[in-house]
Amino acid sequence: MAKIAFIGYRKKAIKAAIALGHKPIIWQIKNTPSCKETLIIEPFPELNEKLPITVKQFFEKHGPIDAVIPLTEKSIPASLALMKGLNINYDEKMMAATHDKWQMKETAKQHAIPITPYALLDETNHLDIFKQWGYPVFAKLRDSSGSRGLQIIPSEKALTALKGKNYLIEKSIIGTEMSMEIFFHNGELIFLNPTQYYSHLAINIVPAPLDCASYEELEAFAKKLIQAFKLDDGIAHIECFATQDNLILNELTIRPPGGFIMDLIQLSYGFNPWELLIQIYLNQAPDFQKKAQQFSACIIFHPGKGEIKAIKGVNTVNALPTLTKLHLKNKVGDKIKVRESSGQFTGYAYFASDNYQSIVSDIEQFQKGLIIQLK
């Protein structure tokens, strides 16, 4: 039985560890009532901050630790601090580079990997940005990922308001945005899944129909990233643009993806990706299906801010042929906040079929059929 330190909380990762016969030991920033495992609740340090002594003593008490696995973006600096505090081998510079957007892009540039043009707002004459790139530009927090903190900047006035707030500015790219989820072991690529952003922050399809780039191109790109960032064992979520000329790196981070992509991988390929991740960290040789058996999709819905007045069409959408699961997180009378990131939603639905167009057709019918009315 191995002792695995999970930094952050994702229920299916914990369940996978238990199913494999291991002991999860969790560091989380807030209480999780459903969690019955060994748990410490302490704030996560930022990059280059020391490990809190209470956390160090906790893991020493319950150790020795066989693996440290970050489960969320915010947990990456905490994972670094824990490995340093427990004298576990790791490449601090490269792990930090996958969390800090500016360091990540600088590393990619040093290895001649195409990247979205970028600039640190606080170190740049922001008036020059629009002269070089035109409108709009994207503003992202350096130490965040996904949609949280993302802003589309249409004017110089809007950009000026962000000065002094640690933002990275990126040029708008003409191309198809997508993601790759890769697993690597001993520095070698062992699995690659392309994900289609069918509707950004709302609908993901796995595997992506490769009409914008070939699998061989994606594989070569992923291998170049593994080499550049010295990725040894684990998982990476890579966001990129497929243009007419090449693949362009947008973001890379060494933690499991959001958007229910891990569930879609299991639906499409037939193996449990959480178990695979744990086996890799424990230096085991997993045997799994590397070729997709079917397409799968997830639609994440959010009606906007307000109080739910009515939910209609549930029976209608449940009858859709490719729908495999519908989960409604909220009910009539609940008050819904403004959506600030992809992790905020009122519900989700899964679809699966060996026919891509059947899934797309059912997604369109789902969007018309399920109606969430707000007051």
Image: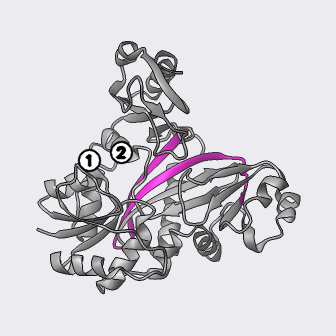
User: Compared with residue 150, is residue 298 higher up or lower down, i.e. above or below?
Assistant: above
The image shows residue 32 at horizontal and vertical percentages of 28, 53
The image shows residue 235 at horizontal and vertical percentages of 38, 62
The image shows residue 53 at horizontal and vertical percentages of 31, 82
Prevailing SS of the magenta stretch:
strand
Residue 312 or residue 255, whichever sits in front:
312
Q: Residue at x 74, y 71 (%)?
A: 122
Query: Which span is picked out in magenta?
Result: 170-197
From the image, tell me which residue sits under label 1: 271
From the image, tell me which residue sits under label 2: 265
The disc, 2 or 1, on the residue closer to the chain's N-terminal end is: 2
User: Compared with residue 80, is residue 303 higher up or lower down, i.e. above or below?
Assistant: above
Report helix, strand or loop for mark 1: loop
The answer to whether mark 2 and mark 1 are in CB contact below 8 A is: yes
**Considering the image in quadrants, where does the C terminus appear?**
top right
Task: Please rate how many residues cluster around mark 1, counting C-alpha atoms within 10 Å: few if below 14, some from 14 to 19, many from 20.
Answer: some
